[in-house]
Image (cartoon, grey):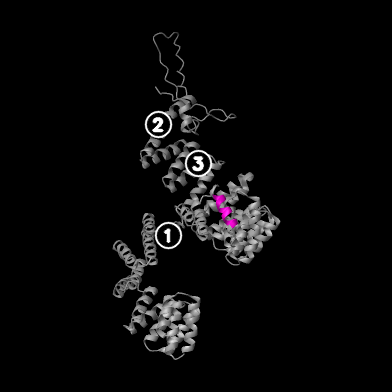
Amino acid sequence: MHTKFPAALVLALGMSLTAPGYGAEPAADKKPPPAKATAPETPQRTGGEKNGNQRRPLPPAPAETLAQQEENLLPRVVFQSLVGEIALQRGNIGIGLEAWSDLARRTRDPKVLARAVEVATLTRQYPLALELSRLWLEVEPDSTRARQAQSSLLVMTNRLEELAPQIAALLKRDPEHIANNLLNLNRLLARHQDKKAVQRLVDQLADSYDDLPEAHYAMAEAATNAGDEMRALAELEKALLLRPDWEAAALARAQLQIRHAKTSAIAGLEDFTGRNPAAGDARLALARLLIGEKRYGEARQHFDRLLKDNPENPEVIYSVALLALQQGDTKTGREQMEKLLDGKFPDQSTVHFYLGLLDQEEKKPDAAIAHFQQVTSGNQYLGARTRAAQILLQQGKTEEARALLRDTQGGSASERAQLTLIEAQLLRDAGQIGEAYNVLIKALAVQPDNTDLLYDAALTAERNGHPERLEQHLQHLLKLQPDHAHALNALGYSWADRNVRLAEAFDLISRALALLPDDPFITDSLGWAQYRLGRLEEARATLERAYRNRADPEIAAHLGEVLWQLGRKEEAQQMLTEALRQNPGNDVLAAIIKKLQF
């Protein structure tokens, strides 16, 4: 005897009890098919028959009723669907998939087919999912959901050639949402790697809707993704002709124009915002472009309008604050930044960083430190901790400054090395050269091949009176990175300055200059090596070129000495005196003037 399952359970499983061919009720205008004829039984006589009359044949067994068909199907459907779901929950993907796909083929029930397609897709059995989706559409040809499922599968399997009729049918069936559906075309096809093929497909689909701006926007987006920027611009212009107030299209056009001519982007946005004054995003983009072109006054006008229209918009407030600070309007900058602390601006750390800078400039060290210590993440984190440490050092609190840096969390080996370099610089600034070198050596014990640590340790060792350690660190560095221009220059200059291994020094510095031909300090090193080699005129020309590029006091000292040795003493005296006036208290200039005794 079959047990009848409650209807609620069947509904919960999401299945129909009227699958075609399995207990389905006939259409209202059709009669049930006649029962199949059966052969009559052979008449039998019994002892009770009278007058030779025979009994009439027994009637045929009645056909199975629809209710009985339904009752016979239901346990099988429920059982197999439960088997499939339990298998999937337990990770038996093969059993679960087989149960659902077999049930879908046998029942041809749309809801069963939908679940089978879903299971096959989730388990990445795309060929099977496609087969089942085709069966689903065969059973339910007008199902939008079935067509959407098949379209997604065709995208996943890179079968764009089959997509066009499917998507075209979907677009045609949903005229009420045609605009949004056109705009979603590129998102649907985003996973396909052949962007030119995607562009051709979008063009084919959108061409039928030439009177809709969204169709041209979709074609522009596809063209942009395919690298066809001129076509994209043309389609955006068509979209704006059909819908002149469409801000998204105006912004997309500006983004393309920026790549080739910022002036065109600015002109386009100025025209658009002039005709659409309330277009806040376009105005914001325009203001930022104007800042990039250093047209600060015009940018400020647009930001003022934005702030008037959006007084509580944190993005606008932040932009206004930055522009004010850039223009030297610290009062407005501070007011707007402090307003962000009370609002919902997500990057509070950056706000505290800028307020710390303002306090530092206004000689409010304690307030600056308080802000810098509230920078807890982001690009400004290390900078804020460094500045706080520098303020502590200026206050004579060297150990507190070092402790602050040591407590700073370096998320990566690179950041930890950066913190070490900062601490070493603070110690050098405090005159503690030996301790700075010790800090670097401890860090190198952990990261022996870090080129930044090796370079800093080399220069610190030389400042501490150990040129042999400079050579050791730089030679190690150059084994790791033979084309490290600054290491080549530092080693070559050290030899030239000490008047040793001059030919090798000249070669190293020449290699460095070939790597960085416009570097004034490497050019200075080359001139100094030429001077040590006795090539005075070459040295003068090289050093003059370096000094033209960078009026650095050390370059001035070298050039002055060469001019003096060439007998151009008055010229040397004038140049060195002027350099000292511009760099009062410079030790290098003071030393050369003392050496030349003028």
**Location of residue 268 (image quadrant):** bottom right
- Residue 593 seen in the figure: yes
Mark 3 or 1: in front is: 1
- The numbered dot on residue 395 is 1
Type of amino acid at the residue the image marks with label 2? Phe
Residue name at image x 37 percent, y 75 percent: 490
Considering only vertical position in the picture, is 378 above or below 459? above
Q: CA distance from mark 2 to mark 1?
A: 80 Å
Mark 2 or 3: in front is: 2
Marks 2 and 3 close (CB-CB < 8 Å): no
SS for dot 2: helix
Number of marks present in the image shown: 3
* 332 in the magenta segment: yes
Marks 2 and 1 close (CB-CB < 8 Å): no
Type of amino acid at the residue the image marks with label 3? Trp
Range of the magenta residues? 331-340
- The numbered dot on residue 136 is 3
Q: CA distance from mark 2 to mark 3?
A: 22 Å
In the rendered structure, the answer to whether residue 252 lies left or right of residue 541 reads right
